[in-house]
Amino acid sequence: MDVDRVADELYELDPAEFVRARTEWVERARAEKDRDAAKAVSGLKKPTVVGWLVNLLARERPDEIDAILSLGDALRTAQRRLDPQALRELTAQRQRLVRVLAARAGELAARRGRSVGEAALRDVAQTLHAAMADPELAQTVRRGRILGAASYSGFGPASLESVGAAVDSEKGQEVDDGAEDDSSAARAELDVAARAELDAARADEAAARDGSAARDREHARAAEDLTAITTRLAELDRERSRLEEQADFARRAERAAGEAAEAAREELRRALDRVGEAEAAVEGP
């Protein structure tokens, strides 16, 4: 049994179906007396919804996943070179791509009948951010074998988080100038990256502010339209009431006129009868 192929199939499944399908594969391996495969498959862990979403992206949108993970390499290069312009541009590009891919994950899930919330999509975005910063995690993402959400505190090599101790704990002496230079360079690198993140965040804020203002204007126009339509409906209601009163008056008038006409016709018949009687009397026997 090809365990890798089985794993690919399992990690593409909705997490709700994972355990049942894994059990079926294990039973199949045992029936084939393939103990190694049965053990390997039974050891495959069920992914969370976030892990499943990232795995879907890796399978359904491999080119986009490669593009965003390659952007992580470009960002690390820009950090090493302390290139603030490149960092700002790449960071803004990263933010856009992550948003697009997170939304794409929601669409892929919807096609499979699963509705996911904003919190899950935010975790997908955080996992992609982490994969861009961690080459090992990036490789796991590319294989579509992520089990759950991953996060990263800041962009750059993980070793940067441990830089900063400038005193030998045993001798109480300062480290050599080379170590200080490395520490200063690392701090400068982090500062450039932080400023790039800030610029990108401000750009996102400006775009969101513009979008919010546009939605407010649309809402105001819609409110004006609703007011105008409501006013017109009230006018039509008043006009209808007036016309109904006129129609009621016309019905009463028509009924009265009909009764008067019938009475006149009856009077005419009586008059004709009298004329006939009178004529007969004049003519005699």
Image: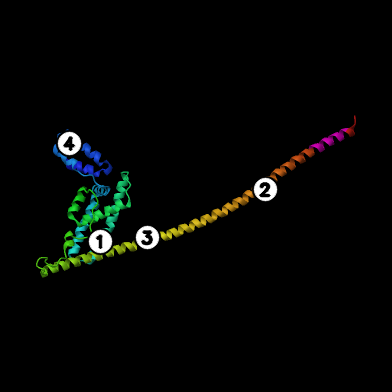
Say which amino acid is labelled 1. Answer: Thr
Measured Cα–Cα span from mark 3 to mark 1: 21 Å
Say which amino acid is labelled 2. Answer: Phe
Callout 4: SS:
helix
Q: Which residue is mark 4?
A: 29
**Image location of residue 228, percent across then percent down:** 51, 57
The segment highlighted magenta reads 269-280
Measured Cα–Cα span from mark 4 to mark 1: 47 Å
Left/right placement of residue 226 relative to residue 166 reads right
Question: Which is nearer the N-term, disc 1 or disc 2?
Answer: 1
Measured Cα–Cα span from mark 3 to mark 4: 55 Å
Residue 84 appears in the picture as rendered: yes
Callout 1: SS:
helix
Q: Which residue is mark 3?
A: 211
Q: Which mark is residue 131?
A: none
Q: Which residue is mark 2?
A: 249
Is label 1 in contact with label 2 (beta carbons under 8 Å)? no
Membership of 100 in magenta stretch: no
Question: Which is nearer the N-term, disc 4 or disc 1?
Answer: 4
